[in-house]
Amino acid sequence: MSVALDAQDAARLQDCMTAGGLAVLPTDTVYGICCDPDDRAAARRLYELKGRPAARSCAVMFFSLGPALEALGELPSAERAALQALLPGPVTVLIANRGHRFTAACRSDPATLGLRVPRLQEALAALTAVAVPVMQSSANISGEADARALEEVPAGLREHVDLVLDGGELPGTPSTVVDLRDFDLQRRWHVLREGALSREAVDRTLAPLR
């Protein structure tokens, strides 16, 4: 059962991020937990709540593609075309972090950025109004199952964040991770984790750009 979010929910999420808070939110795949990707204190709190290893990076999520491409203005044209082909969608794309942005999210690998732009179903589309990126990870205890519904998010997370948004039941399969760091020079990509988008669909999408 879907639960529609509205403009007020989007504003609450953006306010939470700019105030240094943590939020649980629905995406196009599973429930996530997020914070400002430049706020080291908020990132530390997120990692502690999840029990996530300190060196492991998190994705940076933009809620629409235009702001993501604008923020990453130094993208080579081929890589930009690949992002436009894959996003928005249920994928996490690894690209070179040429501007060394979002160090709180990139952790021990500041040269790599994990980028997410979800393809939000109609009931969640209000979140596309969120104008700030977020550092996002699955709303689970590290290593445990992903949450398809809000009640599957561990109580220890729900009770210790500053905002919880209920988007109803989600598809439940995590994003596919696609490494594009070789794409600009070699037109190669690597599917590191097959998830909500099949390996074959990734290949079909990117093959015409070779």
Image (cartoon, rainbow, N blue to C red):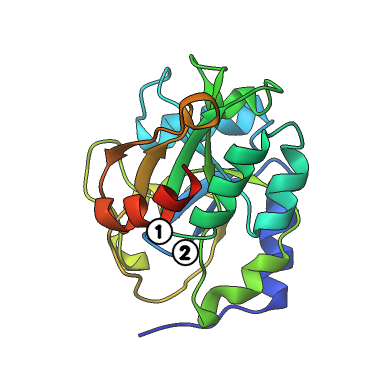
In three-dimensional space, the C-alpha distance between marks 2 and 1, rounded to whole angstroms, equals: 5 Å
Rendered location of residue 101, percent (x, y): 68, 26
**Left or right of 8 on screen, residue 179:** left
Residue assigned mark 1: 31
SS at badge 2: loop
Between 205 and 18, the one nearer to me in the picture = 205
Q: Is residue 117 above or below residue 122?
A: above
SS at badge 1: loop
**Left or right of 28 on screen, residue 144:** left
Between 139 and 207, the one nearer to me in the picture = 207
Between 176 and 124, the one nearer to me in the picture = 176
Residue 132 visible within the image: no
Q: Which mark is residue 123?
A: none
Residue 139 visible within the image: yes
- Residue at image point 60% right, 39% down: 78
- Residue at image point 54% right, 60% down: 88
- Tell me whether the residue at label 2 lies in contact with that at label 1, contact meaning CB atoms closer than 8 angstroms: yes
Residue 204, quarter of the rendered image: bottom left
Q: Which mark is residue 26?
A: 2
Query: Which residue type carries mark 2?
Result: Pro
Between 70 and 36, the one nearer to me in the picture = 70
- Residue at image point 69% right, 40% down: 20
As drawn, the residue found furthest toward the top would be 108
Q: Is residue 202 above or below residue 77?
A: below
- Residue at image point 57% right, 17% down: 110
Rendered location of residue 47, percent (x, y): 45, 30
Q: Residues within 10 Å of mark 1 (few under 14, many from 20)?
A: many
Rendered location of residue 177, percent (x, y): 36, 42
